[in-house]
Image (spheres, coloured by chain):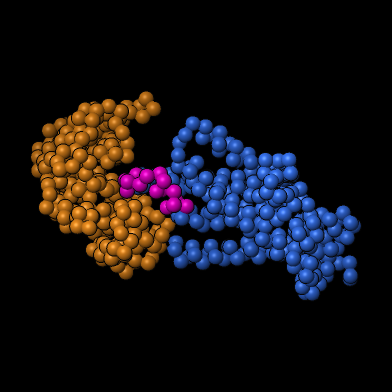
Chain colours: A blue, B orange
Amino acid sequence: MEDNAFCVALSLLVSLDAALFQIVVLSLKVSLMAVLIAAVLGFPLGAAVALWRFPGRGGVIVVLNALMGLPPVVAGLVVYLLLSRAGPLGELGFLFTPGAMVIAQVVLVLPILAALSRQKIEEMLGEYREQFISLGMSRARMMPTLLWDARFALLTVLLAGFGRASAEVGAVMMVGGNIDGVTRVMTTAIVLETGKGNLPLALGLGLVLLTLVMLINAGAYLVGEVTKRRLG
Amino acid sequence: MTSLNASYLPSSSGLLAPPALCFDEVAFSHEGKHLLGPCSFTLDGIGPTMVMGPNGSGKSLLLRLAHGLLSPTRGKICWSGQELCPRQAMVFQQPVLLRRSAIANLMHALAVNHVPRRERMKLAMEALDRFGLAACAKVPARVLSGGQQQRLTLARAWLLSPQVLFLDEPTSALDPAAIKAVEAAVLEFHQQGTRIVMTTHDIHQARRLAGDVLFLSGGTLCEHTSADAFFNQPVSPKAQAFVAGELIE
């Protein structure tokens, strides 16, 4: 029974293992912070691309859509090069800190949030455009109205972004370094334990990660449903 | 603050004659397809003006050009009266409402028009009350019935205190009771001195509301006469057939 992954996961949780707790908290902190920053930048960016017509707009949309499939190791490599001592941002000394992991995940999540919100907002704009022009609204004034009216769709987009951030391992491994107690998160810990042959612990960590993601999604779903029912 | 109030309080516009709308050889084509005109007319009577004609005759197009949602391919649209471009509002066939409560929809329109925050709630409640929607203030706008939704768009237009109100078949999807409420609201706008330009294909509705009639067929303006003349002695053969209840194209 000792080797059973479920038992390991359960005992890790029940015993409130300090090391596990630290890993879980750091994982959540990094991914939530990354999603938050990506949302603040990505939603207005998506709305702007939906609203304004400019030369090269089609190219921007294609690039955003393509970057949704950006391999995490490539994002990690780019951020690594930027933050490494010899890189342009090397002075900051960010490499192998949680801050670097946040930056790498922002790079991964931003295109998802921007591309999907662009699509949702463009759909909504098709419905609202004439009324908005009739009300005398400028494009800049339309943006907050559209972002707020698309809030339920954007919540789902946010979850997609969080899923990407919490699941990836390549980028945080490269720029974080999986340093015990400093930059070790759930995914990098799973890779490490698997490499060491400690499969039950790896699987146990995997189950904890899955449960957490599930809980966050369930919470967001409930909030969305309740608000939707109240506001229509 | 007085001048600001005057700009959005509905009662103030009642004192002024509604601005006249002038189409000068206006034509519109899209992707090489000729859709309207060239047509010339001036709306300077009291109205309300009913724009009539069969489907595809260019009624909605004419309204959108006049309101500025589309730009004419040729010709000129101008306003005469006290201002170059009067305050306008438009009510669409399908009510376009935000995914918010009824009152939040009205407050949004006020916010867009720079009405001070502390006055928005009061003005919005007054408008809801005027259009019989006070009980629905907190209800999500999109779960209201079709008639209530259209009344809400009229309440929103009311808050903008337009000098000109365009309505694009506002009652085509409504039952008789809702149509009655909408028509009463349209007449209330009219009595406040707002110029009404409304499309309809319901000849009975036009008889009830019209002061003058613009009759379109196939993108051409066939007739612009007073309602009396249009319904009793239409001049053009198309209009004669239309008034006689024949199915024209």
Q: Residue at x 68, y 54 (%)?
A: A99
Q: Residue at x 21, y 46 (%)?
A: B164
Measured from the top left, where is residue A137 in percent x and y?
35, 47
Measured from the top left, where is residue A139 in percent x and y?
40, 44
Measured from the top left, where is residue B156 in percent x and y?
29, 56
Is A189 located above or below residue B224 in the figure? below
Measured from the top left, where is residue A39 in percent x and y?
56, 52
Name the side, left or right, on which B213 lies relative to B201: left
Residue B12 among those drawn in magenta: no
Which one is in front, A190 or B64? A190
Name the side, left or right, on which A149 lies relative to B228: right
Is B202 located above or below residue B108 in the figure? above
Q: Residue at x 51, y 67 (%)?
A: A226
Q: Residue at x 68, y 49 (%)?
A: A92
Which one is in front, B33 or A159? A159
Residue A135 among those drawn in magenta: yes
Work out which quarter of the rendered image holds the C terminus of chain A and state it. bottom left
Q: Which residues are magenta?
A: A133-147
Q: Quadrant of residue B248?
A: top left
Which one is in front, B26 or B163? B163
Query: Disc count in the image?
Result: 0
Classified by dominant secondary structure, the portion drawn in magenta counts as: helix
Residue B235 can be seen, yes or no: yes
Residue B179 can be seen, yes or no: no
Q: Residue furthest bottom?
A: A15
Work out which quarter of the rendered image holds the N terminus of chain A and state it. bottom right
Is B194 located above or below residue B81 in the figure? below
